[in-house]
Amino acid sequence: MKRYMILTILVVLTISCGPKREKETESVISEQDQRMEWWREARFGLFIHWGLYAQPAGEWKGEEIPGISEWIMARAKIPVKEYEQLAATFNPVKYDADQWVRLAKQAGMKYIVITSKHHDGFAMFQSKASAYNIVDATPFGRDPLKELADACEKHGIRLGFYYSQAQDWHEPGGTYWNIEQGEPHWDPELVREPLMNYINGKAVPQVKEILENYGGLDILWWDTPRGMTEEAAEALQAVADQYPAMITNNRLYRPWPGDFSTPEQHVPPTGLDYDWEVCMTMNTSWGYKHYDHNWKSSETLIRMLVDIASKGGNLLLNVGPTAEGEIPEPSVERLQAIGKWMDLNGESIYGTEASPFFKLPWGRCTSRSTNDGTTLYLHVFQWPENNLLRVPGISTTVNHIRLLADQDQTLSSHFEGDDLLIELPGRAPDLVNTVIVVETRESLDVTSNMPSLSGGQIVLPADFADIHNPGYGTHAILKGSGNEARIINWVDSRVRLEWMFNTAEPGKFTVKAQVSAEDSSKLRIRVGEEELEAEIHATGSEFAETILGEIEISVTGDLIISIRPVQDDWNGIELGKVTLVRQ
Ligand code: FHN
């Protein structure tokens, strides 16, 4: 970090040294590109939600409080003075910053972002601006963020602090849950004051403290801009502006984009033309919740990281340490499994670019441009049964194909039309994700395999669907590939599916789908402004071709079809391919 700042200063100095230098500025990357350079290379970071809420861990006075555990103060409507008492017993004696940082590093992560103050208003760092902080208000008496900063410096890991700038349930001027709707604080003793009292009295001084006292942060991660005003945002931004090399996210004030956007608990279906970082929990809650056992598998997490990298984004994967200061064992196991995979395959993630393909039914692709051509990293999630990997619509000269984890294993290939067919070994060396490296020479042209009108129909395979799962709920998943691909576990009525397709001709289409349903359900299908409601009847456990109805497509070009459950008429279905047949 410090080295990076010196570099920045040198560049700025060179830029301001007269006309010759000014010319050079044209070739110097923008200030934002420069500060984003390490972050774009990094691809993978650790999010840590740690605070007083780790102590109740989702339970208050013997009652399990629904929702994410760091929200317990609001959800259980705990009065401020009562919640404050948690500090008196907060003593995370097992906390070992060095161990946390080593774990992140082992997982292949390049940066850490930790909650310095969440919505409960409690500072996890030493603060002169508010005595409600871990050093002054707990028996622990240590500054865990200072220890973390030192460990990050020692192990070469970048560090960011999360700071909840608007919501502060502890302060009369902080914004509270639903205050915008006119709801008062749940604690009648907390009488509302103007927001700027809190911003000037606590938020600005505390942000100054975290930026000054921890060796210079790499990232400042704002959260929940609801209730922020431009005046408040400007006061905080003025502090952040003193640190031009520091990256900030887009959550300070809604209209301001920051350096990167932050899709939460979902992966965008396609790449985005700005920097973005998915923040994601391994189970459901961000903070530690002792009865949250809804863990995503290591396989899901590895594939998620790859999916995100294939779309050009970063993954900030969360852990919620306990009140004793330990990262829960299921999180440790998952981080270690990811690390094992990254050890062999990290080259296919760090500093890579997005996939040049529209969809690859068997997995994902990341790429890297070199002076001589392009290196493609093919991430095979579904090993093809005939051991022939089809890379669709690619025109290039192939230099060399090999397994990333076993450099000596060269693979043969041939072209079938525009499709490159790679001969794979009989069994997948890594069932979660085997990476094949294709080195190409000169230019690389890819013809999009986006579904389009051909032979009077548009076929939308299940493995081309973008599954939009709710952040907190049951997730539908894809099983199998090609003709066998199915969307299963579609029980949550908030899950929707989308496909992109292209049509050059408008017209009326019959919508057909392969469906398996144990009970009847209703679906809503939409293309542009046109919508149709379809009724599904029980098919038993068999898949049956089902006519869903007719839809008029009056526009042409790249379009999206979405299929979503009708909320009160949903019993869950499994879905294979969907076909639009032109009438
Ligand atoms: O309300 C918070 C939540 O507790 C958590 O910190 C997440 C992480 O991105 N941010 C807010 C919800 O968007």
Image (cartoon, rainbow, N blue to C red):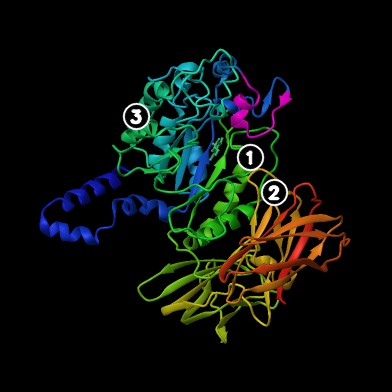
**524 and 135: which is toward the camera:** 524
- Look at the image and tell me whether residue 143 can be seen: yes
For the residues labelled 3 and 1, the Cα–Cα distance comes to 35 Å
**336 and 48: which is toward the camera:** 48
For label 3, the residue is 208
**109 and 450: which is toward the camera:** 450
Disc number at residue 494?
Answer: 2
For the residues labelled 1 and 2, the Cα–Cα distance comes to 31 Å
**Going 68% across and 83% down the picture, which residue do you hit?**
455
**Going 30% across and 43% down the picture, which residue do you hit?**
244
Q: Name the element at disc 1.
A: helix
User: Was residue 45 drawn as part of the magenta stretch in this picture?
Assistant: no
- Mark 3 beta carbon near ligand 1 (under 8 Å): no
Disc number at residue 329?
Answer: 1
Q: Amino acid at mark 3?
A: Lys
Circle 3 or circle 1, nearest the eye = 3
Which picture quadrant has residue 20?
bottom left
Task: Answer with left or right where residue 243 lies relative to residue 404.
Answer: left
Range of the magenta residues? 63-78
**Going 55% across and 84% down the picture, which residue do you hit?**
418
Q: Name the element at disc 3.
A: helix
User: Was residue 77 drawn as part of the magenta stretch in this picture?
Assistant: yes
Mark 1: few/some/many CA within 10 Å (<14, 14-19, 20+): few
Which picture quadrant has residue 255?
top left
Circle 2 or circle 3, nearest the eye = 2
The location of residue 306, given as percent across then percent down, is: 55, 59
